[in-house]
Amino acid sequence: MSRQATGLRAWVLQRISAIYLGIYFIYIIGHFVFDPPDSYQAWSGWLADPFVAVAMLLFFAAVLIHAWVGVRDVLIDYVHPIMARVTLLTLTGLSLIGSGLWVMRTIYLAGATVR
Amino acid sequence: MKFRIYRYDPDRDAAPYLQDFQLEVHPGMMLRDALMALKDQQDDSLSFRHSCGEGVCGSDGINVNGRNCLGCITPVSDFKAPVTIRPLPGRPVIRDLVVDMSQFYQQYRAVKPYLIRKDPLPEQEILQSPAQRERLDGLYECILCGCCSTACPSFWWNPDKFHGPQALLQAWRFLTDSRDQATEERLDALEGPYKLFRCHTIMNCVEVCPKQLNPTRAIGQIKDLMLRHSI
């Protein structure tokens, strides 16, 4: 079994990340409806709060995990030639990791510029 | 009533085609009766499988107006003309409505659809409480007609690796049987991205099952049990 890609773990990660995404969406929509930041300073100040920043980082981590499992499922379903599948999985993985790193940088800089 | 029936004889036809038939239907006529009448009266080369005629043997799974069903228990009056009859989707066609179900049976065989005991077998039967017996309801009734698995897109794309709803329903039937003692081995055999986890809860299987069984729920229960045995 160990030489296979995971079945149960991928499925569980997809479910758990979905729950976090669902809860976070309610929180973030609520925040922007009832207390929208009206300036860059307000944005920075909000993001400088470690709880807000960590919750947002976790949100993007959940998005990346969820997207990885979902795209992996689609590729396993439809793309059967092995080289094409490996190439597409690699590209997907790289772009997801790249997006994650960029998000970390963005959130760090936004919080760091607060005065 | 107008029927359009998928015809293909690999020895003679370059490609499959739909042939039109007109048939006088009578009340209570099942699709199987219509096919038999057409074969008898109009074209004796029309090929299809059938046997018991009462939804027990599971031989005459066909695709009618885009939906899998058993010919023998589906009334013609359920459909509007023209009634288009095709073989079960995604399977290699042997001739007309007769398809090669080998992969379907291989997947069934792969889940070891029989009781596995480690304790010595008792002199008499292995007893179950009524509650334990009840857990098999909705599972043991499967007749292996193949309507569910051949309606499943995941089975279309990976019929060699994904067990399909029929085999997974049976996997759960033995996992949940109080007399079976191979739970760990069965769960281990289902791990990996293919055998169980190609199911994306599309639920075509539930929609078409002529016995009103629910393979999707069984698959969910397998995942549940797998999770409980893993942490």
Image: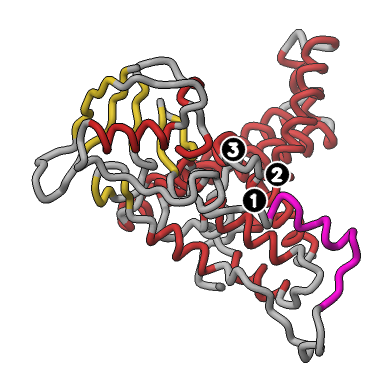
Chain containing the residue with disc 2: A
Q: Indicate left or right for B92 with A48 as reference.
A: left
Do the CB atoms of the residues marked 1 and 2 lie less than 8 Å apart?
yes
Do the CB atoms of the residues marked 2 and 3 lie less than 8 Å apart?
no
Residue at image position (45%, 25%) is B76
Give residue B227's quadrant in the image.
bottom right
What is the crowding at mark 1: few (fewer than 14 residues within 10 Å), some, or many (at least 20)? some
> Which residue in the protein does label 2 denote?
A15
Give the percent coordinates (x, y) of residue B161.
Answer: 45, 60
| Residue A76 visible, this angle | no
Query: Which tag is nearer the camera, tag 2 or tag 3?
Result: 3
The kind of residue on which mark 3 rests is Met
Q: Indicate left or right for B230 with B194 as reference.
A: right
The kind of residue on which mark 2 rests is Arg
Mark 3: secondary structure:
loop
> Which residue in the protein does label 1 denote?
A11
Mark 1: secondary structure:
helix
* Distance CA(mark 1)–CA(mark 2): 6 Å
Give residue B96's quadrant in the image.
top left
> Which residue in the protein does label 3 denote?
B203
Q: Which residues are magenta?
A: B126-139
